[in-house]
Image: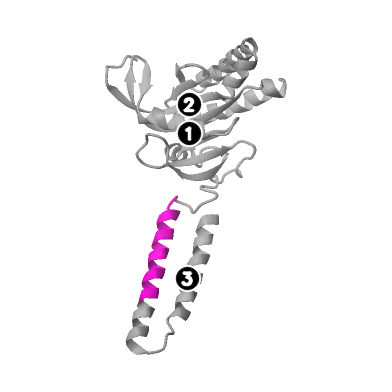
Amino acid sequence: MTTQPGERKLTTILSADAFGYSRMMGEDEAGTLATLKSHRAVMMAHIADHGGRVFNTAGDGLLAEFPSVVKAVESAIRIQRDLSERNAGLPEDRRLRFRIGLNLGDVMVEDGDLYGEGVNIAARLQALAEPDGILISGTVFEHVRGKLQLSFDFLGERAVKNIGSEVPVYRVVLDAKAAPGRPPPARAGVPHGGNWKRELAFGAAQAALLIAFFFTLNMLTSRSLWFQWPSLVIAFGFGLRAIYLLRR
């Protein structure tokens, strides 16, 4: 399908790059390049099998788009599992391990290439991922939760370079599956909904108002100081709530 200059569309972006590629090239250019070509061929095959299209292969990286969010995540999983098997047959220092980031966003289309924040976020997630790992944005998570038998770890809302707002980030758990018929655990590690900062700030404001109330009441009704005792209880309660929010 042809596109007009300046056209925009909503699509799922997969960004992948090889971890430690520059070091490996410095040690063995020919061998590393051969491994890169072999691994990239595997990646491109899985992308095509899941209805995706590769639109950029600069350096050791790869960018692809998918019309289906679910298929994009499935493709990323197949890629990492297949590459892990292939790397197992290589010496430890010659294993080329990839990091993958996925984002659903609005992009600009120009001569078959894609640009814009939708692409940039996928690239930032890829840079945050561990080798052999997959990170997805909140927009991807909302479309795949309950549709794939997978578990996801919520890593928090991250500030990423050149992106105006924080991005909810999830790690795809590749070594475990969610129980059949149940949605994956939504946001392990922080409160459900990603609003823990707001909840913490609201709790702090409540505690401060209650302490101020008891202090004012104490000053107006008694010459002896007693407000510190209910204030300590309030502060202790807020501390427990803060620990719960940060550890849940």
Q: Quadrant of the N terminus?
A: top left
Q: Secondary structure at mark 1?
A: helix
Nearer to me, 77 or 94: 94
* Residue bearing mark 3: 235
Q: Amino acid at mark 1?
A: Leu
The span from disc 3 to disc 2 (Cα, nearest Å) is 46 Å
Q: Are marks 1 and 2 in contact (CB under 8 Å)?
A: yes
> In x, y percent, where is residue 12?
42, 29
Q: Quadrant of the C terminus?
A: bottom right
Q: Residues within 10 Å of mark 3 (few under 14, many from 20)?
A: some
Q: Earlier in the sequence, mark 3 or mark 1?
A: 1
Q: Nearer the viewer, mark 3 or mark 2?
A: 3
* Residue bearing mark 2: 15
Q: Earlier in the sequence, mark 3 or mark 2?
A: 2
> In x, y percent, where is residue 54?
46, 18
**Which residue is at a point 30% across and 16% down the rendered structure image?**
3
Q: Are marks 3 and 2 in contact (CB under 8 Å)?
A: no
Nearer to me, 19 or 25: 25
Q: Amino acid at mark 2?
A: Ser
Query: In terms of secondary structure, what is the magenta stretch mainly?
Result: helix
